[in-house]
Amino acid sequence: MIDAIADLIKQADAAIAAERFDDLMDFYTEDALLVVKPGLYARGKAQIRAAFVKIAAYFQNSVRPSQGNMVMLEAGDTVLVLSRTLLQADNQAQSAYSMDRRATYVFRRRGDRWLCAIDNSYGTSLLDEDGQTSIG
């Protein structure tokens, strides 16, 4: 399981870097949630795809994500992934957001596949934001 999910995350990172957003949607559940930035969330594949297009434009079509250390916690058909996520981009010095993050991802098993249900590259740093409320 650990190797399979680590490989999926690596494949998703490659799809992001290559801007293969249709392929990227194969990694998500239908009702997935993406934290675009603190306070801004995309839900479902259509919104997530649109968000990745905007993220690519923000980084001048040069974003290259990768993962450092990972810890995976499994409970039945759910896995919580804690990961050091590193972003590189040509204009990263101008980014208002950290390029070195402690991400949290939630994967669910659907049949014989693991799919990402929650993609939160900001991890627990969301707690540092004033005025945040949970969403349903």
Image: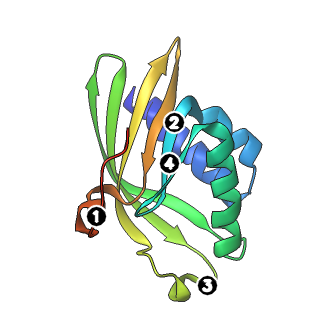
* Quarter of the figure with residue 53: bottom right
Would you name the residue on which mark 4 appears? 34
Q: Name the outermost residue toward the bottom.
A: 93
Would you name the residue on which mark 2 appears? 32
Q: Specify few, some or many for label 1: CA neighbours under 10 Å numbering under 14, 14-19, or 20 or more.
A: few
**Residue 133 percent across, percent down from the top left:** 30, 54
Instruction: Judge whether 82 appears above or below 136 on screen.
Output: below
Q: Type of residue at label 2?
A: Ala
Callout 2 secondary element: strand
Q: Nearer the viewer, mark 3 or mark 2?
A: 2
Q: Specify few, some or many for label 3: CA neighbours under 10 Å numbering under 14, 14-19, or 20 or more.
A: few
Judged left or right of residue 78, residue 67 is: right
Callout 4 secondary element: strand
Callout 3 secondary element: loop
**Residue 68 percent across, percent down from the top left:** 38, 58
Name the one closer to the observer, 61 or 31: 31
The disc, 3 or 4, on the residue closer to the chain's N-terminal end is: 4
Name the one closer to the observer, 84 or 91: 91
Q: Are marks 3 and 4 in contact (CB under 8 Å)?
A: no
Callout 1 secondary element: helix
**Residue 92 percent across, percent down from the top left:** 55, 82
Q: Are marks 2 and 4 in contact (CB under 8 Å)?
A: yes
Rendered-image quadrant of the N terminus: top left
Name the one closer to the observer, 89 or 3: 89
Rendered-image quadrant of the C terminus: top left
Per the rendering, the mark at residue 125 is 1
Q: CA distance from mark 4 to mark 1?
A: 15 Å
Residue at the image point whose x is 50% and y is 48% from the top:
34
Q: CA distance from mark 2 to mark 4?
A: 7 Å
Would you name the residue on which mark 3 appears? 91
Residue at the image point whose x is 74% and y is 56% from the top:
19
